[in-house]
Image: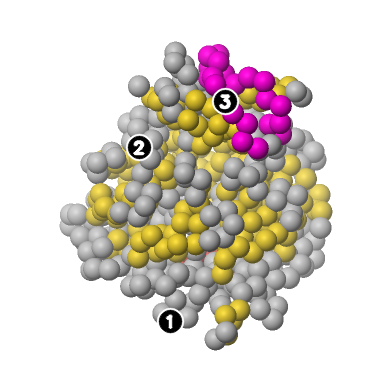
Amino acid sequence: MDDHSAGFVARVCMVVVLLGALVPASRAHAQTLTTLFDFYCGASCDDGIDPIGSLLQATDGDLYGTTYSGGGIYSAGVNDGGSVFEITPGGQFTALFDFCIQYGCGDANRPNGALIQATNGQLYGTTGEGGAYGGGTIFTMTQRGALRTLYDFCELSTSPCLPTAGLTQASNGNLYGTSGRGGAYGGGTVFEMTPDGTLTTLYSFCAQSGCPDGKIPYAGLVQATDGNLYGTTSIGGAYNGGTVFKITLDGTLTTLHAFCAQSGCPDGSYPIAALIQEPGGDLYGTTYQGGANPRTGTVFKITRSGTFSTLHSFCVQSECPDGAAPAGLVRTADGALYGTTMVGGAHGRGTIFKITTSGTLTTLYSFCAQSGCPDGFSPSNTLMQATNGDLYGTTADGGAHRGGTVFQFSVGLGPFVETLPASGAVGTTVIILGTDLTGVSSVTFNGTAAAFSADSATAISATVPAGASTGTIVVTTPSGTLSSNVPFRVMQ
């Protein structure tokens, strides 16, 4: 593979777009996949097509996502710049906003990263193209669809440029992200932005000859329990296969691992999905290529100090029944990791898999199970577990109208609660999301009772109580207790 330079990002995006209603899946644990919505590019493509970003569950209980292409009609013609949509867990779809691909449209186009909901209740996202300088934007949006551009990338030759991932809100309240190009050396950046739009470049990649720090960070960041941010670069590093890095909130970067350290790249190469952290502290991720079977990808584990191990290399048998080219991972409330592959599987069009933290992988579903692929194919993003226990995701292609799909995948997991944010000091107000929170009688933080108020059936507000320690949040409802999917971290 060549240096990729400016065309790398476009080619990776095109891979997931060009590869290529109840459908039964494997019955080991009664898994079922249900197509909730089929995107359609008819006369106007007004609902969008090519949904390649992950879904978000917001405080109203609904799911929010983006499409890379399509959208509604402006007076000057078809608006093919992508869209933002809302869909209920039951499948009721609403198009919220259409981006404009035409010259001069200040709202930009091509949203290809996941949305996040910040603690102020607003949604935040990025676009990969357009805006005032043609290099993409950061935008904020209400859950009703009112959008405002906060930052335009590529203003100067040294500015961050071409973001390809969503943002992360850290414990200090600021938003952090990556850009695939730009910065002082042209290799991309890590940046910090306040919720109102003031942006600071924290680090510019490829600071030395040969780029030992890596370049072109394609994925977003995760804040670990030590307070630092962790991420990957898609290429560069000591062996030009990409890197895993740690960066402090003030911009001190440490390279933890350089991929493709040996001939054939058994440790994988070209990581393009965000890392996740297990409660025990270790980080998990995927590579798009490499592994024991070249060009098919891996699942890996890395400690915060940099000890690296490959958990699984895809395509272990003829025709890749376990899939190939994995997207990102999600940790579910039962402690397992779930993910998707973009290709491979029983029908060659991608899979859903489960993998333990020790590396035992089980293929749960192979897409394109019927003629015409009504269930969609090429799932190119990280799954999301909603508070009802089910997994939700999208396919970039296929479905009844060949524009991609939104799907629900049930593996028999029960409901839970999660917090926004996932950490906070004593006295901090946090939002607790759930499926049926009507009539809550108590909230505890690792056993310590907390004051709370009911906001809606899907969200309550609680204050981190004095004496609380890091651990599970338990919410008592008339129908039983709900526990948080990850420990809430009490900051000192």
Does 448 appear in magenta? yes
Numbered tag placed on residue 172 in the rendering: 2
- Earlier residue among tags 1 and 3: 1
Q: Which residues are magenta?
A: 436-456
Foreground residue among 268 and 434: 434
Q: Residues within 10 Å of mark 3 (few under 14, many from 20)?
A: many
- Above or below residue 462? Residue 87 is below
Q: Amino acid at mark 1?
A: Tyr
Foreground residue among 135 and 85: 85
Q: Is residue 237 left or right of residue 387?
A: left
Q: How many marks?
A: 3
Q: Is residue 105 left or right of residue 67?
A: left
Does 439 appear in magenta? yes
Residue beneath label 3, please?
452
Q: Is residue 260 left or right of residue 373?
A: left
Please identify the residue farthest to the bottom as the structure is shown.
76
Q: Residues within 10 Å of mark 2 (few under 14, many from 20)?
A: few
